Image: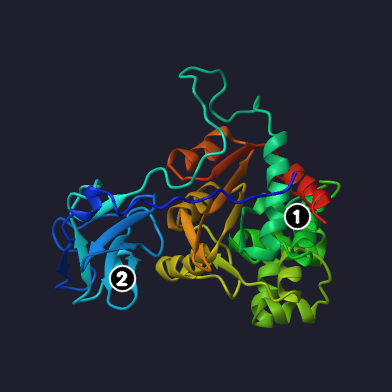
Amino acid sequence: MSFQLPSYKAPNFSDTKFKNAPNVVLKIVDKDGIAPENYHAMSIYPEYFKIHDKWYLANESRMDGVPVFIPNKGIEVIEFRNLKKDDLVVVGRTENASEGIYVHYNGFIAKENQTDTFSFRSNRSRETAFSKDYDHLYELLKHEKENGYIVWVLGPAVSFDYDARNAVASLARKGYVNALLAGNALATHDLEAGLLKTALGQDIYSQVSYPNGHYNHLDLLNKVRRSGSIKQFIEDYNITDGIIQSLEQCNIPYVLAGSIRDDGPLPPVYGNVYKSQDAMRKHARKATTIICLATQLHTIATGNMTPAYTQINGEIRPVYIYSVDISEFVVNKLKDRGSLETTAIVTNVQDFVVNLDKNVK
């Protein structure tokens, strides 16, 4: 099976409703961080705006962002807190071109049509068959390795298992990881495993708890902070395996977003939530495929900041998101937000990454 991106079909702007549509109304921001009244908020779909009798596709589409017209650049999607005085914001809340705003719901041509109004097992659950999803993902990743930008969002559970940790490190070395988004815990326990072969004091292979093992992650944090950086710690203690070591070795960027629960934290962890959001968003906006494993809050946050589509060499393509967790609620939560190409897989994430690593070469 060879992977093919779905075709995108733009609206026919020669139709009467588009030709007769008015230009959008643009209002000036009069105070940083505050949108004008009746501002337009973006959906997950491709959206077009008529300005000076020309239809502009927003450079990306992210829920709850505000479309801002930038002369000679087009429509940029800006977060409320990042609006600046004198920005030109689109106002209007219709979606049918009557105010110069058009939301294109069916731009990506579906490969399959579901005609039945009733069917069993329409939601993702433990009973769902995932074989086709795995096969699709294998082919997608082979395509993305050469043509896309693959972002991983990892919870600490991935570092608790010997084989899972090795599998993610292997995928990074093979070129299937372009960026990683995580929290303090994932990196802490991965580095703890590299130094002491434990995660939270428990052997990552045998699951045997070490005496005084509850000190292990704290000792690890203290050592990294003494080294001054993760890179220096890896050199100081000759760490030769693991997820973070592979990222450092391969010069793959990663963002560690802080939490009120954090111990330490590690030196590169962002303590300011908005700075961490900005750092995560840089990779989410470049992403063509995102794989989220065992982290509910990071998954939802990343999904909310990820465009539904991206443009590469003038071609419009969807952004694929995979949400993988052993909890049905977690995987369906992201899908329920309306992402166009979200696939939910209910499984043990250790088994998922090991399977993935074995099937992409």
On screen, residue 319 versus residue 354, left or right, reads: left
Which residue lies at the image location 48% right of the left edge and 49% below the top edge? 300
Q: Is residue 120 above or below residue 4?
A: above
Q: Is residue 220 above or below residue 343?
A: below
Q: Nearest the camera: 214 or 268?
A: 268
Of the image marks 2 and 1, the number of the one nearer the N terminus: 2
Position of the C terminus, as image quadrant, is: bottom right
Image position, residue 294 (x, y; %): 62, 46
Label 1: which residue? 201
On screen, residue 301 versus residue 197, left or right, reads: left
Which residue lies at the image location 82% right of the left edge and 66% below the top edge? 241
Check disc 2 and report its element: helix, strand or loop.
helix
- Three-letter amino acid code at disc 1? Gly
Q: Nearest the camera: 70 or 194?
A: 70
Mark 2 closeness class: few <14, some 14–19, many ≥20 residues within 10 Å: few
Q: Nearest the camera: 200 or 12?
A: 12
Position of the N terminus, as image quadrant, is: top right
Label 2: which residue? 82
Mark 2 and mark 1: Cα distance apart in space: 42 Å
On screen, residue 268 versus residue 130, left or right, reads: left
Image position, residue 161 (x, y; %): 77, 50
Check disc 1 and report its element: helix, strand or loop.
loop
Residue 114 image label: none
Mark 1 closeness class: few <14, some 14–19, many ≥20 residues within 10 Å: many
Q: Nearest the camera: 228 or 62?
A: 62
Image position, residue 102 (x, y; %): 28, 51
Q: Nearer the viewer, mark 2 or mark 1?
A: 2
- Three-letter amino acid code at disc 2? Asn
